[in-house]
Image (cartoon, coloured by chain):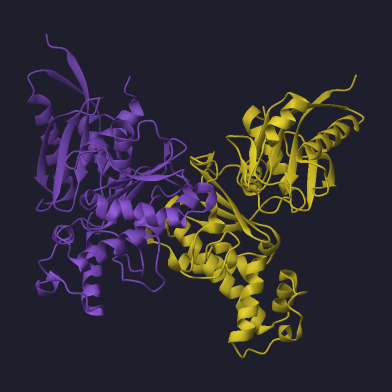
Chain colours: A yellow, B purple
């Protein structure tokens, strides 16, 4: 009889797709699958469908897998209540008892948190933060998400929602944010924020740029990156401004948390020399003396396509231990 | 023979005076004393003198006291290295090995951190935070100090200097701060900040005020409080502006830490209805939805004259346990 291998399931619930994977204690994804998040009759049916997908993954291997629990990364996931609460980009509104529904199917530990907290846990267990007790994980996508490790523990805070650095206000009466307030960090530092900056530079400056001839509705942050790489001054300025806002915000977060590392993850994080290095320069210029040379910005050690699953699966590996 | 009572010593090293006290496990100060901080031949002599004072306190009681360790609250106190580092308002410059020197005298545990961290520990062990795992302690004096409890642990961070909320920048190109940067929170929210606000309002507005006839060199924050209490519009506006800046900053800190309580301590914190209540109002207006009704601002439960000693003594009680 084949050896039994312990795995945990990681589920990443996104606005478009929901991704599943089975993960061993070393962070190897043994198998994965995905379903569309939209188009289900109810949240209950969506969960039932997801559960059947996980069961299929478990049975699809030629060796024996033993499921130890299920971790979920989801927008506004609440670790204390096992719920998804008022998630703006999901079709289901209100408070969704995601952990309770999955527990009924599997009778195993089920934990849920937001995707950025999951990414931070993934970084700690399987990425570049294995020996680091104080760090910030920043995920740069459409918005800016974050997870914080402080004194070796993932910070949930009293509400379970600690670490919403994307919604720290960096400009008084600044850009309108989807949260209803103005000047949030993520309106400047995110794919969306970069594009807003390009638009502002196009209308507020005389800078010559290839981007002036492009339909903004089709422009992506990747395009801006390509233009910048080709020397487009306006695109370079847009990255520099983004790095400036990020660097100054990180200097402030350092005065709160004093992290050893700040890991950037996601599309924009790939723009190393255009974002990461100048952000570190601006942060260092702005650091209080006692923090000089105590903190650096680095790329996440998690692979793009794997981070969400690994992070979600890490919720359970962290609880039951890898030994 | 009399019963032996265990105590820890708390030392608060301030710019003017250094205060000592012997504290039992319930937070009772059994005896205390003070010496001037300035005027000693060297830091070593200052420590030797302090040690002899503690020994005298131990022997001055009619019952037997057993010293279990010494905790120190000091500006720029570093818990990891047992040092005071580059403290701006002490005569001795550079890095001072305060814990090492006291250990030689007593051969007992000695711990040092900054005064605001000590106050947070005092709040946790002896004040209003006994059952609270996530809170921020803010000390309002000449400047703004802070100590942070996250997930039940005092946050030191990688450098040992986490929790310098007074040096989070709240206004781009704002008021000049003693740290060399501009717009730090403490340039607005502190006794000094309140007086700066009064000066600005006097020169920038036409508001009638009794304070227009006063020599600013003699004006204190307590005076401004008294004027406000007597209905002086300008004084009331100064408090309202201070509360506004504080409230907005606390909304941002909540997006990082999600505390359950924010405790205010120090002179300005006594201005309850003038500062605490409006700060809470402004904070609530600015909170991200998920944090609504999860956080409140309260007065510290530590007595003004006792907090520094209790907090310093708590460094040791926390380590050895009160049982």
Q: Is residue A206 left or right of residue B199?
A: right
Q: Does the image show residue B297?
A: yes
Residue A153, image x, y percentages: 53, 39
Residue B110, image x, y percentages: 28, 35
| Residue that lies at the very extreme toward the top in this rendered image | B1
Numbered label tally: 0
Name the residue nearer the viewer: B104 or A228.
A228
Residue B77, above or below A216: above
Quadrant position of residue B170: bottom left
Quadrant housing the C terminus of chain B: top left
Name the residue nearer the viewer: B15 or B110.
B15
Name the residue rendered at 74%, 46% in the picture.
Answer: A13
Name the residue nearer the viewer: B42 or B184.
B184
Residue A65, image x, y percentages: 83, 27
Quadrant position of residue B245: bottom left
Quadrant housing the N terminus of chain B: top left
Q: Does the image show residue B85?
A: no
Residue B58, above or below B129: above
Residue A279, image x, y percentages: 55, 67
């Amino acid at each position: 009889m084949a050896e039994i291998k312990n795995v945990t399931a990681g589920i990443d619930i996104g606005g478009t797709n929901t991704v599943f994977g089975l993960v061993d204690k070393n962070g190897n994804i043994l198998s994965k699958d995905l379903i569309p998040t939209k188009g289900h009759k109810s949240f209950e049916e969506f969960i039932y469908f997801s559960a059947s997908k996980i069961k299929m993954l478990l049975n699809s291997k030629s060796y024996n897998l033993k499921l130890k629990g299920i971790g979920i990364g989801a927008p506004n996931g609440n670790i204390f209540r096992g719920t998804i609460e008022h998630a703006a980009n999901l079709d289901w509104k209100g408070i969704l008892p995601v952990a309770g529904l999955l527990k009924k199917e599997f009778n195993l530990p089920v934990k849920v948190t937001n995707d950025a907290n999951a990414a931070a846990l993934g970084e700690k267990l399987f990425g570049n933060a294995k020996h680091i007790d104080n760090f910030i994980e920043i995920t740069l996508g459409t918005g800016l998400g974050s997870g914080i490790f402080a004194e070796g523990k993932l910070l949930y805070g009293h509400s379970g929602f600690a670490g919403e650095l994307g919604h720290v206000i960096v400009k008084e009466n600044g850009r309108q944010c989807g949260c209803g307030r103005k000047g949030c960090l993520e309106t400047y530092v995110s794919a969306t924020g970069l594009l807003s900056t390009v638009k502002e530079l196009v209308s507020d400056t005389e800078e010559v740029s290839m981007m002036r001839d492009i339909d903004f509705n089709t422009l992506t942050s990747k395009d801006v990156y390509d233009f910048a790489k080709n020397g487009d001054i306006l695109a370079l300025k847009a990255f520099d401004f983004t790095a400036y806002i990020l660097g100054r915000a990180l200097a402030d977060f350092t005065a709160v948390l004093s992290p050893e590392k700040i890991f950037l993850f996601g599309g924009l994080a790939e723009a190393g020399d255009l974002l990461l290095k100048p952000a570190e320069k601006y942060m260092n210029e702005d650091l209080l003396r006692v923090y000089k040379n105590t903190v650096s910005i680095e790329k996440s050690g998690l692979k793009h396509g794997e981070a969400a699953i690994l992070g979600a699966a890490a919720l359970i590996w962290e609880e039951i231990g890898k030994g």
